[in-house]
Structures are given as structure tokens and as C-alpha cells.
Amino acid sequence: MSARIKASRISAGLSQTELAVAIGVNRATVGHWERGGAFSPSLEHLQALSVTLQVSLDWLVHGEPSVPPSSTHATVSLSPRLAAEQRMVGLSRQLPLSFVDRVLALMEGMAAYL
């Protein structure tokens, strides 16, 4: 699985840091996953990896189907809105809940003017 995570990340054109921010983990965690060993992503993180890297969960976990993701994944990018939302979620996981609540209240207030 570690090799598939790394290959998919590279194919998607993401650095370890960019992937980590997108799924809400530390860069070192992505590095541990890519090296294998005792570190494996949780199911929640596997799902986030699958979406972010645009590969199937089955392929990511089991290598099925046996054909790796096509090179078209490198040219497919997330919509700017989805990419921004993933960055916001990733960053919010590193903030105190009280701060996240304030940001949400600010966004809700701004939505009333749109």
C-alpha cells in the first residue's frame, strides 16, 4: 500500500505537504505511510486519500484491479472550490474548536450578504 500511496501522490502532482494539508494530517504522517512498516492510514484517512488522489479505495488498499491508475490522473485536477474546501478542512483540524466556531460564525454572517 505504501508504494501505491506514493505513486498516486506523485501522479497527482502533490508534495507530501500538500497531500497532508488536503487530508488533515502532518507531513511526517504521509512520509510514514509511504515508507510502510508499522504505520498505516486509518479508514477515514484511506477514504480521504482515495478522493484526494482520485484513485479507487480498492486499488489503494489491495492493488485491485491489478492495473495501476492511468496517467490521466496526473492531468485531472480538483476543482478550485473543492481544493479550497479540502485545504480549509485540513487546516481547521489543527485549530482549536473555539477558533473554528468563530470562523464558521463569520462565514455564516457573510453568506447572508450574498
Image: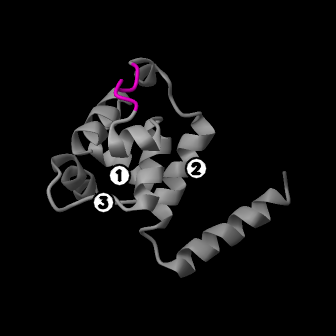
Name the outermost residue toward the bottom: 98
Give whichever of discs 3 and 1 has the lower sequence position.
1
Residue 6, above or below 68: below
Real-space CA distance between mark 2 and mark 1, rounded to the nearest whole angstrom: 14 Å
The answer to whether mark 3 and mark 1 are in CB contact below 8 A is yes
Badge 1 crowding class, 10 Å Cα cut-off, few under 14, some 14 to 19, many 20 or more, is many
Q: Quadrant of residue 25?
A: bottom left
Q: Identify the residue shown where x is 27% and y is 52%.
A: 30
- The residue at which mark 1 appears reads as 20
The image shows residue 48 at horizontal and vertical percentages of 47, 51
Three-letter code for the amino acid on which mark 2 is drawn: Glu
Q: In which quarter of the image is residue 104?
A: bottom right
Residue 37, above or below 76: below
Give whichever of discs 2 and 3 has the lower sequence position.
3
Q: Identify the residue shown where x is 45% and y is 44%.
A: 57
Question: In this rendering, would 112 be left or right of 8?
Answer: right
Q: Is mark 2 on a helix, strand or loop?
A: helix
**In which quadrant is the N terminus drawn?**
top left
Bounds of the magenta span?
Answer: 65-70
Real-space CA distance between mark 3 and mark 1, rounded to the nearest whole angstrom: 6 Å
Three-letter code for the amino acid on which mark 3 is drawn: Asn
Three-letter code for the amino acid on which mark 1 is drawn: Ala
Residue 110, above or below 19: below
The image shows residue 27 at horizontal and vertical percentages of 27, 54
Type of secondary structure dominating the magenta stretch: loop
- The residue at which mark 3 appears reads as 26
Q: Identify the residue shown where x is 24% and y is 52%.
A: 33
Q: Is mark 1 on a helix, strand or loop?
A: helix
- The residue at which mark 2 appears reads as 85
